Amino acid sequence: MPEPFSVLLPVYRGDDAGFFERAITSVTRDQELRPHELVVVVDGPVPDPIAAVLRRAEAGELTAGVPVRAVALPTNVGLAGALEAGLAACRHEVVARADADDVSLPQRFARQVPLMADVDLLSSAVVEFEADEAQHGLQRAWPADPEEIARLARLADPFNHPSVVYRRSAVAAAGGYQHLARLEDYWLFVRMLHAGARVTNVAEPLVLYRVGAGAYRRRGGWELFRSELVLQGRMLRLGFTTPAQFARNLVVRGLWRFVPPALRRPAYAAFTRWRDA
């Protein structure tokens, strides 16, 4: 039998209540293998529609018997702080991540959780969608082989964060989530790999990743460029990258942050096709 596991899902005032409800049902009621608990971190005050969805989830209306526990933070602390608070509240060693606007496919946990017997961290491919869950866009998949993952990690995040499952102890051993705007997950995974975490990926797409208006715009700009500079400096000081890789990343990843938003999606699709060729 697979290990018991928690699902960790943060929500904040900027999320959409309808998307939040769909995310909850997708990781509980709709799953072939249901989690033993859903931990929802409420990152600061939220509007009434989101609070109403959470009350319905806690009452069992949305989750088909999966217990829901809310961790309410008095102020908005950001994603890293919210996830650290949520991990501290999870009762199980194995934790699956979910976001408040994505959809986990019914087979997700049945495919991923049994693999956790041999690894500390894994994710799956994800498929982008906009409004209609049946209308799929770009698929984002990463290698399954640990050595390929380690090589890729020197240039790009080799895991899809909305589909990640990990061991709490391995996350804690690497220092947990640390604030780094929009790159918290990549920095955590780098440190887990550097600490010797056992890793893999599932090639099958198990999460529908919502890309509404502005999704690709948020992957660029000065704020993310500044985070990129910090990340690359940390990776170099950690010894995870070489000076040559550091310089390459500053050029490749730094310039990517200033690609016009209208070109970012086709450019990413072209990179994906090149990588998989």
Image (spheres, helix red, strand yellow):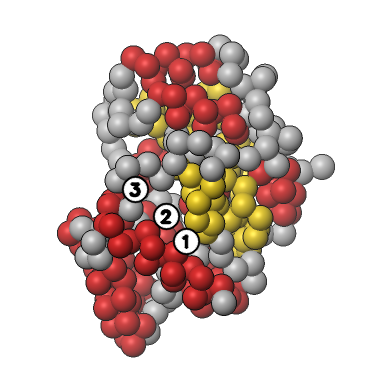
Q: Earlier in the sequence, mark 1 or mark 3?
A: 1
Seen in the image, is 66 located left or right of residue 250?
right
Q: Which quadrant would residue 7 be assigned to in this image?
A: top right
Q: Earlier in the sequence, mark 3 or mark 2?
A: 2
Where residue 36 appears, x then y in whole percent?
Answer: 66, 31
Amino acid, disc 2: Asp
Q: Are marks 1 and 2 in contact (CB under 8 Å)?
A: yes
The label shown at residue 189 is: 1
Seen in the image, is 12 located left or right of residue 161?
left
| Residue 109 vertical position relative to residue 174 in the rendered view, above or below | above
Decide which of 55, 169 is in the foreground and name it: 55
Which residue is at 53% across, 16% downward? 58
Q: Which label sits in the foreground, 3 or 2?
A: 3
Q: Residue farthest to the bottom?
A: 244
Which residue is at 28% across, 51% downward? 218
Seen in the image, is 81 located left or right of residue 147?
left
Dot 2 falls on a residue whose secondary structure is: helix
Check disc 2 and report the residue beneath it. Answer: 185
Q: Which quadrant would residue 203 be assigned to in this image?
A: bottom right
Mark pair 3, 2: CA separation: 17 Å
Where residue 235 appears, x then y in whole percent?
Answer: 36, 72
Where residue 187 appears, x then y in whole percent?
Answer: 39, 61
Dot 1 falls on a residue whose secondary structure is: helix
Mark pair 1, 2: CA separation: 6 Å
Q: Are marks 1 and 3 in contact (CB under 8 Å)?
A: no
Q: Residue farthest to the front?
A: 135
The label shown at residue 215 is: 3
- Please say whether residue 11 is visible from this viewpoint: yes
Dot 3 falls on a residue whose secondary structure is: loop
Where residue 199 appears, x then y in whole percent?
Answer: 61, 64
